[in-house]
Image (cartoon, helix red, strand yellow):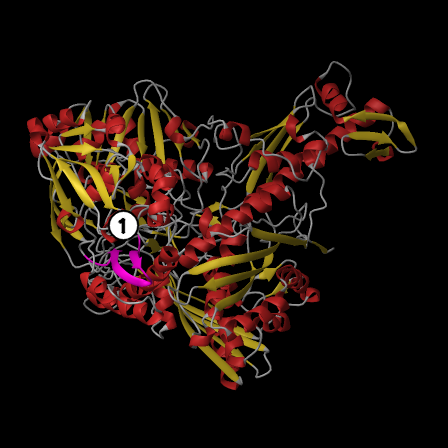
Amino acid sequence: MTTVHERVDTFHDNDQKPVGYGRMLRKEDPRFVRGRGRFVDDIRLPGMLHLAILRSPVAHARILSIDTSAAEASPGVKAVVTGAMLAEQGLAWMPTLSNDVQAVLATDKVRFQGQEVAFVVAEDGYAARDALELIDVEYDVLDPVVDARRALEPGAPVIRDDLEGKTDNHCFDWETGDEAATAAVFARADVVVSQDLVYPRVHPAPMETCGAVADFDAVDGKLRLWSTTQAPHAHRTLYALVAGIPEHKIQVISPDIGGGFGNKVPIYPGYVCAIVASIVTGKPVKWMEDRSENLISTGFARDYIMRGEIAATRDGRILAIRTNVLADHGAFNGTAAPVKYPAGFFGVFTGSYDIEAAYCKMTAVFTNKAPGGVAYACSFRITEAVYLVERIVDCLADELGMDPAELRLKNFIRPEQFPYTTKTGWVYDSGDYEPTMRLAMEMAGYADLRREQQEKRARGELMGIGIAFFTEAVGAGPRKNMDILGLGMADGCELRVHPTGKAVVRLSVQSQGQGHETTFAQIVAEEIGIPPDDIDVVHGDTDNTPFGLGTYGSRSTPVSGAAAALVARKVRDKARIIASGMLEVSVADLEWDKGSFRVKGDPGKSVTIQDVAMRAHGAGDLPEGVEGGLEAQICYNPSNLTYPHGAYICVVDIDPGTAQVKVRRFIAVDDCGTRINPMIIEGQVHGGLADGVGMALMEMIAFDEDGNCLGASLMDYLLPTALEVPDWETGFTVTPSPHHPIGAKGVGESATVGSPPAIVNAIVDALEPFGVRHADMPLTPSRVWDAMRGNARPPI
Amino acid sequence: MQVPAPFEYERATSVDHAISLMERLGSTSRLIAGGHSLLPMMKLRLASFDYLIDINDLHDELGYIEAGPGEMRIGALTRHRELLESATLTAAFPIFADAERVIADPVVRNRGTLGGSLCQADPSEDLSAVCTALDASCVIRGPGGAERLVSMEEFHVGPYETAVGDGEILVEIRLPVRPGCGSAYEKVERRAGDWAVVSAGAAVWLDGGVISDARVGLAAVGPNTTGIPEISAALRGQEPSESLFEQAGAIAARSCDPATDQRGSADYKRHLADELTRRTLRRAVERARS
């Protein structure tokens, strides 16, 4: 394993280079910057109808009656469908990704504001939308469960009375680590610090909302579904299992996707409604939710109420971490996580530190809020885990009077300890933390910043420096441990080289902006020596790509990236045999020189991969036993997750008069192993850091006491703009993954995971003169002002 | 798709044409200028009208900034961007540029209008606070071309309610120009382009080093954007000083009536009323002196 520490990218501009890794302009961008992208809402089929969904105005109510007659009579309306009508077909309920069920259209009760109650299909979207106003639903409003802390109180209204014998709002319990061993360590520790923390409910809010166009052909029995999905193959299988349409008669197409962030992993009732509507009407049907529908009804993220405890020696040796979590899962358990991981990968809450013991106990509850749970670039709850550990380590530093950088450096897992098994059973593949941390401190000018802070404090100015060091776990499977509803988390990949030496690679993963068409072309190019521009990347269409579990949890490069590299090597192996025939030497006498095979000792004698491709399809003889063509396919089952890490430092200034926070600087040093396209990596990091500013300072899906969603528009649910973010300062180190074929680790979510604790730590640090040890997100001016006055309160 | 309920639409060709359309169509009609408040309300179906009368073609008639003797006249259809970029206006009343820089974003400012902002009468609206600070008056034209002049205090009847009656249209805003004036605006927002948590506008008139008049307008601290006469009374005849600004801030804090919401707690908003009153008065005095 080699570790490289560099501030400046030494990769050359790949646009000037024929093959391989490096900075290269994104192949997909010309169509996006020219407005030629093709998104779900751009799909227009002949005779297509439009679907609009009527949603519940209240959080909890029994449906007494639904009168659709006026809507049916409305001009242009073709069909009005209610839950009762779906129930007759056995389609009123569908499975969630967490083995719960969710109503497609409510039959008995509505369980959150925004829940689907009925739908209208009409000739155009306006007629459909107007007809919704004409549906008369009579509700018997029930008391809602809004505060997760009160969900398990005796006498709390039971939300899930659809479940046989259910008498409370308990969703699940989960624990990890060793309770007794952890208690023993805590009992003998010099110092114990505990802190309550809330990671409030936030929303991924992709620019493109969710939607689908369903086209069921009654003659050939085939369903074509264009939908906003991050996991087209998994969706196809689930539709086959739920709707009873044979899997080979379903084609799921995920065209250009305008951002996912986890929001487009689940199957939403709207997709199922569009399918039903197409079957009922015999026409293609489009459903495209509006912004408010997206914010109030689709997969939220976080909503963890946590108590963190940390035990240490007086000289700053961290001994154990313990946490108790109350998880709000909303009305249905719609968490998108591997089945055996109901709390996602929250188990990595021990962070980047070598400790003696750890324990977590979690209780999840149902509330009258939208379902979801794992979404928003969180690497399956690692966002919450990293926030917990990085916040509580800062609380410990405060207690010990130690510099937070020094405390972290003192407790890092050391490079020689890898592969490192944590006290909760995770095997970190590789890491070299100190150089990453030192680089971030050097880029930040850490010592100078602390001096500046001292001077400013003396003048009454508020400046804070916050550090977060994270270890991520990305790239789910392996399949034996990780599955979604029985589908193992492994990815297929196919590579076909055409006679003229151009190639097509077919992926199971689907890009929502990650730049797959470029990165995967580069991965294949590096292995097989065909320039990236000559490699077409096909993805997002189940009829034209091999099976795989999709893009989320930063798994594309760790899983499908490995598949792409290995399938290219498989093709290269075959090419080598053909080349040996062409050059009339044995395979062992050939050496590979990125794009051509040369005869050892006779460099003038060589054939290019393009020559080989033509021979593979040509009229000439091939070596004994070699079939024509130049292609291969594989399915890659990862042996472990990959564990990227990073050191983030944030500098904030706070106006003492208005309590407004200005993020002045943000230094992000990421180690994602081998770097394929540094420009794309930086883009991913920039986006994730902006996400972090949003969550730390302004984003929250709040509810009033009646369960009304207070974040139902982008006027109410604030996303950061360019004016709230500084110029990002990025750096990197390279610690390759030992088990990944090209040593890559995945980076899509690192910045979203790592930035919120860095920003909160900086704000708390700035408020040190007020004796503040913790303040919960979102740190709006009002909430910062409360903290300054000793009134820091949880947001929920 | 967020779409309004069905409505009919007509483009007015003159102010009098717009008034005659309103007279004919009654209260189910509504004027649309920039549309950046009205259309979102209609798309969210919080508002619904049978008829929209588009007055954007009247920009020649209603889009102007004219400096006259003793007063500045601004047409109601003058766009935010024109207010921001007007050297004449900025020279006389820098408070406008202060405010316009923090109103929404360039897309909204290209389209939104002064008259639309005032007529929307949102309690968080910035230009209402600006006009209140500058002691503006509003020219309202009605059927038959009759015009009446109302002060900002009279103009604002309640949240989202103004003195503009059925069949009437706000055509002009008049700002008195007096010597020795300095003005400033400050806004605290959770994010660029958001509505104000609280904002404050202040105008000060100095005469021989003494405050001859001063006005403060606050936004987002109560159901109405109104001036605070007690501040004016406390400042008049005094020499500007930090303790005087503090006194004004304290009056602002106790005179306003903010509510706790997602933007902040009532206590915090009250604090901001104080803080921003002091800051804007301080800057207004600096500007009046320079």
Q: In which quarter of the image is the N terminus of chain B?
A: top left
Q: In which quarter of the image is the C terminus of chain B?
A: bottom left
* A571 in relation to B202, above or below: above
Q: Which secondary structure class fits the magenta region best?
A: strand
Residue B214 counted in the magenta span:
yes
The chain ID associated with circle 1 is: B
Return the residue found at the far front: B208
* Res A279 visible: no
Q: Residue at x 63, y 60 (%)?
A: A440
* Res B234 visible: yes
- Identify the residue under disc 1: B178
* B156 in relation to A355, above or below: above
Residue B227 counted in the magenta span:
no
Direction from residue A785 to residue A751 in the image, left or right? right
Direction from residue A760 to residue B17 in the image, left or right? left
Residue type beneath disc 1: Arg
Q: Which residue is drawn at 38% across and 35% down?
A: A240
Direction from residue B243 to residue A560 in the image, left or right? right
* B182 in relation to A766, above or below: above
Between A791 and A318, the one lying in front of the other is A791
Q: Residue at x 31, y 47 (%)?
A: A715
The region drawn magenta spans: B196-222
Count of marks, rendered view: 1
Looking at the picture, how far across and down is residue B22, in whole percent?
A: 11, 29
Return the residue found at the far right: A601
Can you tell which quarter of the image residue B35 is in? top left
Looking at the picture, how far across and down is residue A444, in whole percent?
A: 61, 61
Looking at the picture, how far across and down is residue A667, in whole percent?
A: 58, 57
Q: Is mark 1 on a helix, strand or loop?
A: loop
Q: How crowded is mark 1: few (under 14 residues within 10 Å), some or many (20 or more)?
A: few
Between B36 and B148, the one lying in front of the other is B148
